[in-house]
Image (cartoon, rainbow, N blue to C red):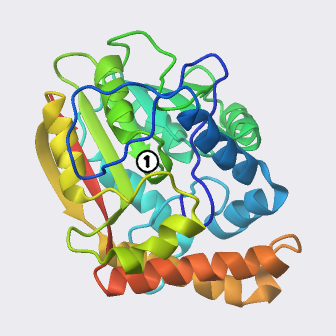
Amino acid sequence: MAYLESSGEATVTTAPPPERDTDSTATHHHHQPNPNASGLQATTAREYYNAPATDSFYRSLWGGEHIHIGTYTSPSDTITAASQRTVERMAALARITPATRVLDIGAGYGGAARWLARTYGCKVTCLNLSEVQNARNRERTREQGLEALVAVVDGVFEHLPFADATFDLVWCQDCLIHASDRHAVVAEVARVLVSSGADVILTDHMATRDADPERVGPIKKRLKLKLDLATRQFYQDVFLAQGFEDAGYLEGTEHMVTHCSRVLAALQDARHLPTDVSGDFAENAKTGMSHWVEGGKERQLEWGVFHFRR
């Protein structure tokens, strides 16, 4: 999730990290890696998600399973229920069987991974940065008796620590906004997927194609992003360049607006917040939520579900 400072993807000390991508709208097939870019971005994310206040924020408001945008069908929907509905909506797009090997990049607490494993009987590998989130993921996986199906790995998604053609499905929710090189991420996703019969199910927070840089700029600054926000066209272009076909896009900006509005309302009702989710942290979170609500309403920002296959 990428509302405040950083996302939930992970760090690996042995991988040579790739360079910063300077153009989120262009498609490049080749570029030279920068040994420092991914490490700096990952350090920012890791420090943020390991902080006790951050952990309390997500666990208290999302319910401890998910940290992504929810899908809302009723005014009475809770954040937890809506977040679970997004997982189910995404899964319905893919070709998942007990034999499907799933990689969840930026897996957070692993809620989606456990649901996929429990529902389909498939094996899921979670790649994530935060040791705090990974520890909770492993703990919940043990508690739910899913250790044989769900594994948790530390790693950055710009350099996936897996062999070629290891997975059938890559699952990615709301974390590529913080990538140091999105072209490298997509290339890595293509590498670790099988050459035929593979799916990618992905969501992200994006700028609209005609977004005003002056309106979106404060979000980039607040989130300490190395890249501009991606656009829908960017993802479609880079996945097509890697040999995937566009299997559809589910536009869901209204859900982003509703979700962030719900989180903002919860933050404003301090009576129900943990004591460590207060003061400067709460105020920063409120500002972040307001950016996403306003940006979505004004069509400067968008959110949706991509499906690519090959």
Q: Is mark 1 on a helix, strand or loop?
A: helix
Q: Position of residue 248 (x, y in %)?
A: 14, 51
Which corner quadrant of the image does residue 27 belong to? top left
Count residues near mark 1 (Cα–Cα under 10 Å), then give few for <14, some for 14-19, many for 20+.
many
Hey, what amino acid is under mark 1?
Leu
Q: Residue at x 66, y 70 (%)?
A: 61
Of residues 152 and 292, the one nearer the viewer is 292
Left or right of 81, for residue 213? left
Q: Residue at x 68, y 41 (%)?
A: 43
Left or right of 292, for residue 48? right
Q: Can residue 278 be seen in this view?
A: no
User: Would you name the residue on which mark 1 appears?
Assistant: 176
Q: Residue at x 61, y 36 (%)?
A: 10
Which corner quadrant of the image does residue 245 belong to? top left
Residue 187 vertical position relative to residue 172 in the rendered view, above or below:
above
Pick the quarter of the image with the N terminus: bottom right
Which corner quadrant of the image does residue 63 belong to? bottom right
Q: Where is residue 300 in the image (x, y as percent from the top left)?
A: 31, 78
Q: Position of residue 230 (x, y in %)?
A: 33, 56
Toward the right, the furthest residue is 275
Residue 63 vertical position relative to residue 94 in the rendered view, above or below:
below
Q: Residue at x 80, y 54 (%)?
A: 51
Of residues 169 and 208, the one nearer the viewer is 208
Q: Can residue 179 be seen in this view?
A: yes
Q: Where is residue 24 in the image (x, y as percent from the top left)?
A: 30, 51
Pick the quarter of the image with the C terminus: top left
